[in-house]
Image (cartoon, coloured by chain):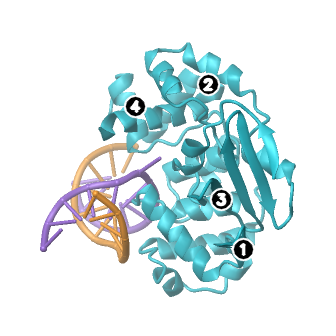
Chain colours: A cyan, B purple, C orange
Amino acid sequence: MNFMKIENYNLEITLLGGQAFNWDFINDSYYGFFKDRIVQIKPELNGFYWQTYPKKNDIEFLNHYLNLKTNYLAKLKKLGGKDKYIKSAVQRYPGLRILNQEFEQTLLSFILSSNKSVKGVRKAVRNLTQAYGEEISVNNISFHLFPSVKELLKLQESDFRKLGFGFRAKYFKEALNRLSEDGALKFRDEDAVRKYLISFIGIGDKVADCIMVFSLGFQNVTPLDVWGKKVLTDFYKVNPKLSYSEMRKWYQNYFGENTALAGQFLFEYIRSLNKS
DNA sequence: TGTCAGGTTTCGG
DNA sequence: CCGAAACCTGAC
């Protein structure tokens, strides 16, 4: 395996925290499944060992996916100085990062997330990959790749209902059609991208923002779920009657280019305060 | 056994 | 534009 020397990368909270649904910790390593590969990351002091399969040593994939090229420490420093809430959050979760995930897998996974817990989404995604994703063995462990849109297009809504998608099965089927018809995104403008995503049935404000942040690199956006809203009302005394977009604008106005990262920190932080 | 979930759509006002 | 009910299913 290759070694990556890096401080301040919290693999656990970043890979398993709800940005992504395709990672499992097995034995001593995190394993993630994608449409064309399995990635292994084994945490160590001062960094981690890693490998990609079947194509080995794909450092470009790793750099991009884990967002290793961003100036993380500079962002943290700027954030920490803002106020006591974000400062506490940054201190509690050192090394929390934002991933850079592949578009289709992210969109399809987050369509399944509506009114489901992280655990529930992870389950649904595994039902999908185990039923329709190619099996691949790594270190004598059996994994399934994330199935391609082309493969999934052959299936019907009823097939997806069998996987436990519930009312999301229809959205999922429709999304596959859209993805295959539309191809890659043709624009980068924030409002245009969001408008496009929301034109999918089953994607509203929150899921659109998740896709924008976790796969399209919008660092000035954060998804507002119940916890993100609670951050605003409880910490920052923002009027709870504000609309979704007004709340998002509040975040953007306050955290600017670091909105995505701030949103993740505050999300994890306020959840931890409400757990115990 | 019942409630509820990190949300979206649909319908009524 | 805004609030409320309905939606599948599994987890607590």
Which subunit holds the residue at mark 3? Answer: A
Can I make out residue A124 in this image? yes
**Nearer to us: label 2 or label 4:** 4
Report the residue at 44% width, 40% height from top: A244
**Nearer to us: label 3 or label 2:** 3
SS class, disc 4? helix
Q: Nearer the viewer, residue A15 or A28?
A: A28
Residue type indicated by callout 4: Val
Which subunit holds the residue at mark 1? Answer: A
**Nearer to us: label 1 or label 2:** 1
Left or right for C1, reference A29: left
Q: Position of residue A235 (x, y in %)?
A: 37, 24
Residue type indicated by callout 1: Ser
The residue that mark 1 highlights is A137
Quadrant location of the C terminus of chain A in the rendered image: top left
The residue that mark 2 highlights is A256
Is label 4 on the same chain as label 3? yes
Q: Which mark is residue A81?
A: none
Residue type indicated by callout 2: Gly
Q: Position of residue A6 (x, y in %)?
A: 74, 33
> Of callouts 4 and 3, which one flags the residue occurring earlier in the amino acid sequence?
3
Report the residue at 64% width, 40% height from top: A98
Left or right for A190, reference A112: right
Q: Which mark is residue A31?
A: 3
> Of callouts 2 and 4, which one flags the residue occurring earlier in the amino acid sequence?
4
Q: Position of residue A65 (x, y in %)?
A: 74, 48
Is label 2 on the same chain as label 4? yes
The residue that mark 4 highlights is A231
Name above or below for residue A2 compared with residue B11. Answer: above
